[in-house]
Image (cartoon, coloured by chain):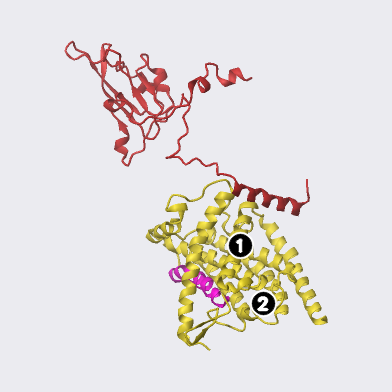
Chain colours: A yellow, B red
Amino acid sequence: MEPWWISLIKAAIIVNLVMVMFAYLTWLERKGLGRLQNRYGPNRAGPFGLLQPIADLVKLVRKEAFAPSSAIDAPYILAPIVSMFTALAAFSVIPWGSGWKIYHWHVTGEVVNVPISLLLIFALGSIGIYGFIVGGWASESKFSLLGSMRTCAQLVSYEVSLALSVLGVVILGRSLSLVDIVHRQGTTLPFVVPQFVGLLVFFFAGIAETSRAPFDLPEAEQELVAGYHTEYSGMRWGLFQTAEYINLITLSGLMVTLFFSGWHGPWHLGPIWFLLKLLGCLFVFIWLRATLPRLRYDQLMRFGWKVLLPVATVNALVTAIVVAAT
Amino acid sequence: MSPQPVSTLKGFGVTFRQILKKPITQQYPEERRPLYPRFRGRHRLWKHDNGLEKCVGCSLCAAACPADCIRVVAAENTPDNRVSAGERYARIYEINMSRCIFCGYCELACPFDAITLGNEFEISEHNRDDQIYTKDMLLAEPMKKIPIADPAIFDTPIPYYKSDS
């Protein structure tokens, strides 16, 4: 058992790492989208536009954060903070490596090893939805309220399929702890092989859960007013945006951990394998955004309830029967 | 027409192939396309070869201007102060570039070809007052040289809508 201050240091490292990853994910997304659409993307700030995220941050921090005079202050200010906090906290249970021996302490590869870490991640994700609905409601604007209702309807619908899709992995891994699941994948095949259907359901539900194209109806920028963050500006809006991107990183990390055997790989590179797999997942998300057009709202709901949910349920049932039979 | 999931996957191939191509974006300030020869940009006032101004202060351009951005105040030419070739000259000739819509009616209205529209288009300023061009500024040679496309190719005597149909 490691002393408490090692966890504290690890938490500080992970938070900063995730923030840097977020900043450069925006760069990668704009650059990648640009190249996928025959454009350059940002290329003015620094070489290859590498200083663009920093310039964006400086601009957002310096910008005045307007608030509607009728907004309810406390929830209005708290909402982006809540979504940001839950997004960051979810990353604490994802294992980055097998653990290292530094001096005479044994340092584990994750911030905390919670036996129910998978449940914890979904619980934090559900609390994060409060940030979206409260932010829209506290703005005292009809567009924001409608936008937050739209967001919540989508997130709540797809949360069900998302949680059901990992049930097969939990049955195969015989644990809710991400650390145990990764360890088991080290001894057997990565779970993407027996749980390919589960991966597909998890992937589609994950796109909807992080509200990215083609399921980006909460913020359909070409068609609708922005949604729950219509009345936000400056760094408060920036926090919502950060939360959205960190949710995407967390989801990709979860996908790597659950289906692609986490940090396992040849030559025991540990965190490097994890980061490479994470980058691959993130690129697929960006690629998807550049390729597919947005769904209609009824198509989104029909796909969620009538396709993903039955498939996820059948997948979990079949996995349970197969595991019980063998 | 292939079934839905196959054509969706094909779409992924199409977008991925674009990464290998060179972007078609033109990096504007460094890389400039030549303008068409008849591009209507900043105005220019002209002089005769003997140094007299072509403008006689008739205000026809101001009358023709739909945006009402030209101000002309005329004065009489005297033997010891001869500015233009006619009876009168433009004592004040101002164009408000922030109002001008670059329609070219002023150059059509001018009986002496004193005002024409040039090719310069980078005329943004930090201050609105700087957008008002005085007579001296309009008479001077434009500072920026803009690349112009070959008139032999693009400035054809027969308009395309007459030659093509």
Q: Which residues are magenta?
A: A73-95
Q: Which residue is mark 2?
A: A186
Q: Nearer the viewer, residue A229 or B137?
A: B137
Q: Residue at x 55, y 71 (%)?
A: A128
Give the amino acid type for the residue marked by disc 1 in the picture.
Gly
At label 1, counting other C-alpha atoms closer than 10 Å, the crowd grade (few under 14, some 14-19, many 20 or more) is: some
Q: Is residue A92 magenta?
A: yes
Overall secondary structure of the magenta stretch? helix
Tell me: A109 left or right of A307.
left
* SS category of the residue bearing label 2: helix
Residues marked 2 and 1, same chain = yes
Which quarter shows the C terminus of chain A?
Answer: bottom right
* Residue A193, quarter of the rendered image: bottom right
Count all numbered tags in the image, as a single digit. 2
* SS category of the residue bearing label 1: helix
Give the amino acid type for the residue marked by disc 2 in the picture.
Gly
Label 2 vs label 1: CA separation?
20 Å
Q: Nearer the viewer, residue A292 or A140?
A: A292
* Residue A53, quarter of the rendered image: bottom left
Residue A70 in view in this figure: no
Vertical comparison of B46 with A3: above or below:
above
Q: Residue at x 61, y 84 (%)?
A: A115
Vertical comparison of A255 with A171: above or below:
above
Residue A279 place in picture, x, y as percent:
58, 63
Tell me: A83 left or right of A313.
left
Q: Residue at x 44, y 68 (%)?
A: A77
Vertical comparison of A288 with A305: above or below:
above
Q: Is residue B12 magenta?
A: no
Vertical comparison of B3 with A14: above or below:
above
Q: Nearer the viewer, residue A242 or B144?
A: B144
Q: Which residue is mark 1?
A: A280
Q: Chain of mark 2?
A: A
